[in-house]
Image (spheres, rainbow, N blue to C red):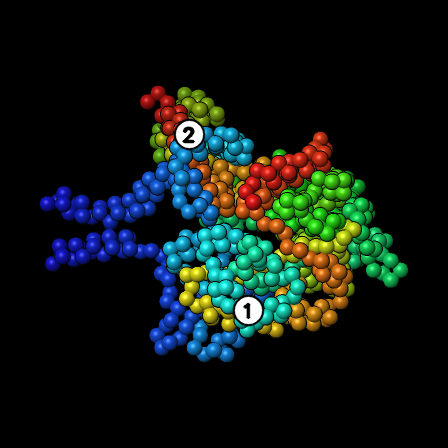
Amino acid sequence: MKKVFVVLLVLLLSFSSVFANGVKDSTPENAGGKRTLRIAAESWEINKIFLEQAAKAFEAAHPNVQVEITTIADQTVLGNYILDWSKGNTNVDLVFLDGGVFAAEYAAKDLINDFDKDLHFFADYPKTNFKEGTLETGTSLTNGAQKCLPAIYEVYAVSVNKALFKEAGLVDAKGEPLPIKTWDDFYDFAKKLTKKDANGTVTQVGASVQFGNNLPTCIAGAVLAEFGKLTTSDGLTYDVNNPQMLHMIELWQKGIQNGYFSQSTFVDNAGGRNGYKAGKIAMCYEAAGRWMEAIPTLGVENLSLMPIPGKDGATPCFGCQMVCPKASKNGDLVCQFIKEGVYGEYSQTNAFLKYGKMSVIAKYFDEALATTPLWKNISVSMSKAQPVVRYEETQKWIDGLDAIFQAGLVDPKTSAQDIVNKMLALSKSIKK
Amino acid sequence: MKERWGRLFVLPTCLVLFVFVVYPICYTTVLSLCKYNFAFDLKLTFIGFKNYTDMFKDKLFLTALGNTMQFTVIMFVLLVVIALALALLLFYKKTHSWFFRTSIFMPIVVPASLICILFSFMLSDNFGIINKALVSLHLSQYAHNWLTDAKTAKWWVIIVSIWGKVGFCTILFLSGLQNIPQDLFEAAEIDGAIGWKKLVYIIIPNLRETLAVVGIWAVLQCLKLFVTPNVLTKGGPANSTLVLYQYIYNQAFLNFEMGYASAIAFFLTALVLVFSSLNMRLSKGED
């Protein structure tokens, strides 16, 4: 008896260690015909796009559907889906991608549905519902195919602390901040807005530019704002080797070396926005929604928004993209949830009004714009918004640019031309 | 009969070892000899030792290797010296030793990533508590861009890593000290060996085995340093704190270059073996 027990125990241990394989794919159809829609998103996406509220409303409208939302820890987890989906397995039906990261990788292996050709999303939801340019934030990632749909839409601008501008005397007769028309203005204002104590220690920084993960978008924004187009004639290389961009980089170098620009984004992507929200940084050149994040700490009366300095005034746009894996059997539910939930008035309007995540649906975009006058400061800029070209080796591009700028900006011996030359060499070396 | 039962009992462990250790090592070996981008390549392409030769032409790999060696040497020395010093203090301190032991060991139980997030807030240029305190105490000339200046960023990676790991080494050394026979100390005192002479001629020779264990553990921790540079500085500024482990992670899971990452992983394994063997030889001495 004892021997039989021991043998059974050994067999149980062997089988459990061999066959334990983590999360099994949950079947979309539960007993009683109830279907489950599985959504994966980062916590900020769940909060700022009001996905839980959208899920509850969807369940109430469709009693035979259960919506499960899983929080993704961070973007590196998204790469794991390639493994699952390559084998035809999935434990999610709809995934939210911050900035569309990995969309190109998924599309390269044909792992995600084309919302137009495979799921016929636009059969009863015309493209004219969308704000102009928003759908292109998805198609630009996947060679023109609509393999992603944008959930929200963002552009870049300069968020400004009006109170600090007033203190520095940088306001007009109406008390509004003086416009930042050129990068010389940006540098001069940053200089006047920077406070140092008797020991030369900076106690208030004039400006922050995102020198971390979003540096390519900041550079793209500067190029677009100056020229109205991003690339040279090859359609892939950033047009930075010209006097205007060289001068801008020189100003960035001077700003960093003199302490007028914050270096915190070298190691902390949120360093600039956190300093801005804390009232320690007067100008923040990042995604335009940063000013709204500062409302609780600074008050809306102390905030303003300006377009990126430059002659043309264009800006880069991007969106949090949604993808549906081909391994999912719930493509129809995904489309329905997007139309009723994500693109519903509640999510689209509140994401815009509370968090500055602009609506991709034209009707809600225009309504929200009308209720928040400050957005009108960049309305011309928004009308010229363009998606930024994405490369196959985007991560190498980001890491390489970060290293070039973080080293070059602090080194007085490195010229702006050196930085641009390295940037162009990097651009040649990566796969596009 | 007994042998048969013995084999049956170790079978589950062998299966687990095979599935989670042996097979991955074999597959990683194959990967290291191939070109394979997980996202864009449909299959492996055999390229022989090209990944290994390309490594030494890769500037970023050499930067990561240089940083890793720097961190390993400095951290190893500081970890052993500080841990031994703390262990000696605890050994000779008889009153309230429980409080000091708990305080020294506490950082071990706090997740490393949490430690790094807290330090990154404390060391922030614009709103960090350390700079704020220095300005308040009229010492603003010492306020600095701690994490965004390449030189100070390296030291803070070392300091934060040591802070999180010194407790474990201290406990090991303390245990070793407590196993030294008391008569040796008494005999040494009678012969006039006090202070540093006791340390050099009595304590350290008798701690040889503990030094070997602490040394191997410390070397492993230093070579596979990842959480601190990844969370505190993200390998920056300008890759000044990028380490090999992080570079492997970036290549494998951000760039999807599985073949190249596998080759670097084997190189790191070889480094670990070399350092561990060296440590064991030095610790064994003339035994």
**Circles 2 and 1: CB atoms closer than 8 Å:** no
Instruction: Name which residue lies at 42% across and 23% down.
Output: B201
SS of the residue at dot 1?
A: helix
Above or below for B46 versus A207: above
- Read off the residue under disc 2: B275
Q: Is B150 positioned to the left or the right of B172 in the image?
A: right
Q: Quadrant of residue A12?
A: bottom left
Chain ID at mark 1:
A
B7 and A64: which is toward the camera: A64
Closest to the observer, A181 or A212? A181
Where's residue A288, x and y in %?
69, 58
Label 2's element? helix
Quadrant containing the C terminus of chain A in the rendered view: top right
Residue located at (24% from left, 49% from top): B12
Q: Are marks 2 and 1 on the same chain?
A: no
Q: Is residue A242 left or right of residue B185?
A: right
Query: For the residue carrying disc 1, how many other residues have a C-alpha within 10 Å: few (<14), some (14-19), or many (20+)?
Result: some
Identified by mark 2, the residue type is Phe
Question: Could you tell me which residue is drawn at 66 percent across and 72 percent down?
Answer: A363
Name the residue that disc number 1 marks: A122
